[in-house]
């Protein structure tokens, strides 16, 4: 018979915000990777105060107010899921341009124009409400939001709109601002209404000064639930920048990381790691996480592992279709790897359950090995490993005493989740966002019985529809929302 030890802190004076979750199966993701049957968790304020059995709990059940006790029977409790790479704005641009509909240029170029020249603070607020709700309903309690496809770095009012909406939803959000890919200068518009605007351009150096402004402004607000990291769109070589500009950019980003005590995040692809190692090796270290890393060489795999750089792999991304991310090779080399959504445009969602399953199968198919990448490892990659990638491992990612109470209850009383055994496997292989019942962030219950009472979802949907369409109209991009020509009876767009 397994003998589970109980983590605890000594009971203190009764707090009105104490919470007891009892009678559930707990997948702790702690150092011992314990799975506790009929377990309980006590939350004091924003922090986990006890993890173990109800029998051994030092906090008497009758010391909790009745409405502060959750009977978790029929539920599995997991740490809040962590989406280590996604894009603010994409919630309102889903599927635009699919199959070439309304496209005048590449998808990336069209999105840059839309975000830089067609949006308003109201757009960014509506998008943050929409994406924040989707994340919470999918069991995501922490997400990194790069501000645009490539970061829109010019407008504090738009940053404020995003931050305020995410804070109201209640999620833990990391705003990512940094220099976008060249060429420079970048042209932006501030709309006074739908017909008049102010247009201006900013240089590469101004992108870096604006990045510092954002990091300084949001590096820790709303009791630490909102953070801001410098997120250069590309970490590596980008055509359109001189070598001196490449080195200047990465020195500045590194300075911001050191001065403000924040991690760095960006995109990298094949060849970028070697370029960084040659020209700005100081950037490569445990404070850096890189999305995609598709098409990288075995030499680059070894560099990332030796330098303790984290990799955020998006198994459902276009980048992965074009080139494989060597997830298994990175893991075998000792690299910290996560699965991320890169959501939610053009063709994906914030469903990290899906990302785990697709991520597992991609590796098993590639190596023709059905036993590769165990389900437990995949769950680690969207919890404790994702926390490490974002520099938050000491706060979130596992259910342990002293960590933040970011918790998710999954209702397993469903046909597709029965018969009920091997709960970690059931969560990874068969669970869906619709099975998420209750979500706590920082000890606050933001969703209960799949209801988020402090947010008017109907109004969020209405506003998101309105603001997305206005943005398209401002630039004459309405055709991007049309159906592609070869949608039916075709095998290729």
Image (tube, helix red, strand yellow):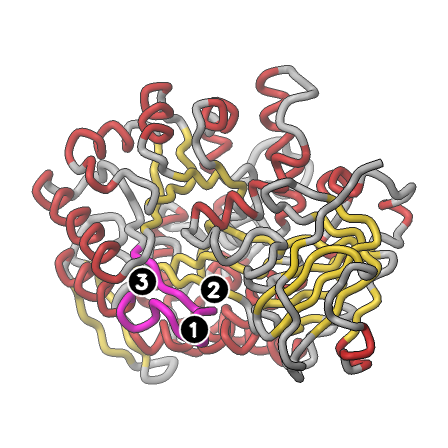
Quadrant position of residue 214: bottom left
Precedes in sequence: disc 1 or disc 2: 1
Q: Secondary structure at mark 3?
A: loop
| Res. 324 visible in picture | no
Image disc number at residue 173: 2
Report which residue position mark 1 lands on.
163
* Residue at the spot of label 3: 152
Q: Is residue 331 left or right of residue 1?
A: left
Expressed as whole percent of the image width and height from the top left, the position of residue 19 reads 71, 73
Q: Mark 2 and 3 residues: CB-CB less than 8 Å, in contact? A: no
Point out the stretch of residues depicted in magenta. Answer: 215-230
Residues under labels 3 and 1: Cα distance? 14 Å
Which is nearer the eye, 444 or 197? 444
Q: Residue furthest left?
A: 244
First in sequence: mark 2 vs mark 3 = 3
- Pinpoint residue 493: horizontal percent, then vertical percent: 55, 37
Label 1–label 2 contact, CB within 8 A: yes
Could you tell me how many numbered marks the image carries? 3
Image coordinates for residue 489, horizontal then vertical, percent: 68, 36
Quarter of the view holding residue 169: bottom right
Whether residue 258 is in magenta: the answer is no
């Amino acid at each position: 018979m397994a003998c589970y030890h109980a983590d605890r802190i000594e009971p203190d004076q009764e707090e009105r915000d104490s919470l007891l979750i009892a009678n559930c199966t707990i997948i702790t993701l702690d150092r011992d990777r314990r799975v506790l049957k009929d377990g309980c968790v006590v939350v004091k304020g924003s922090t986990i105060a006890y993890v173990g059995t109800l029998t051994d709990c030092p906090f008497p059940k009758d010391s909790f107010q009745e409405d502060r006790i959750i009977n978790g029977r029929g539920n599995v409790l997991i740490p809040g899921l962590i989406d280590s790479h996604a894009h603010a704005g994409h919630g309102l641009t889903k599927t635009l341009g699919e199959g070439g509909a309304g496209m005048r240029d590449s998808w990336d170029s069209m999105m840059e124009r839309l975000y830089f020249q067609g949006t308003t603070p109201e757009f960014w607020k509506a998008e943050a409400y929409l994406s924040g709700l989707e994340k919470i309903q999918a069991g995501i309690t922490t997400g990194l939001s790069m501000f645009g496809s490539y970061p829109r770095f010019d407008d504090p009012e738009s940053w404020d709109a995003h931050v305020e909406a995410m804070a109201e939803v209640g999620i833990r959000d990391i705003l990512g601002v940094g220099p976008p890919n060249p060429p420079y200068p970048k042209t932006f518009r501030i709309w006074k209404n739908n017909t008049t605007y102010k247009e201006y351009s900013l240089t590469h150096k101004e992108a870096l000064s604006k990045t510092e402004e954002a990091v300084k402004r949001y590096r820790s607000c709303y009791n630490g639930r909102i953070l801001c990291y410098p997120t250069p769109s590309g970490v590596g070589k980008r055509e359109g920048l001189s070598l001196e500009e490449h080195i200047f950019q990465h020195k500045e980003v590194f300075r911001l990381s050191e001065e403000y005590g924040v991690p760095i995040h960006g995109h990298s692809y094949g060849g970028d790691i070697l370029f960084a190692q040659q020209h700005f090796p100081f950037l490569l270290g445990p404070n850096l996480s890189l999305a995609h890393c598709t098409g990288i060489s075995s030499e680059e795999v070894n560099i990332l592992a030796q330098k303790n750089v984290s990799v955020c792999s998006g198994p459902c991304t276009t980048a992965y279709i074009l080139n494989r991310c060597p997830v298994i090779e990175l893991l075998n080399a000792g690299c910290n790897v996560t699965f991320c959504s890169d959501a939610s445009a053009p063709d994906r969602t914030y469903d990290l359950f899906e990302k785990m399953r697709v991520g597992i199968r991609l590796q098993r198919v590639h190596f023709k090995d059905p036993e590769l990448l165990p389900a437990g490892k995949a769950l680690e990659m969207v919890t404790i490993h994702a926390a490490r990638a974002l520099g938050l491992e000491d706060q979130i990612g596992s259910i342990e005493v002293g960590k933040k109470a970011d918790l998710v209850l999954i209702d397993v009383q469903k046909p597709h989740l029965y018969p009920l055994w091997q709960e970690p496997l059931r969560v990874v292989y068969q669970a869906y966002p619709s099975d998420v019942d209750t979500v706590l962030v920082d000890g606050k219950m933001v969703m209960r019985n799949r209801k988020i009472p402090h947010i008017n979802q109907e109004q969020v949907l209405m506003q998101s529809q309105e603001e997305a369409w206005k943005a398209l109209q401002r630039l004459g991009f309405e055709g991007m929302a049309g159906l592609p020509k070869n949608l039916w009876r075709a095998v290729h767009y």
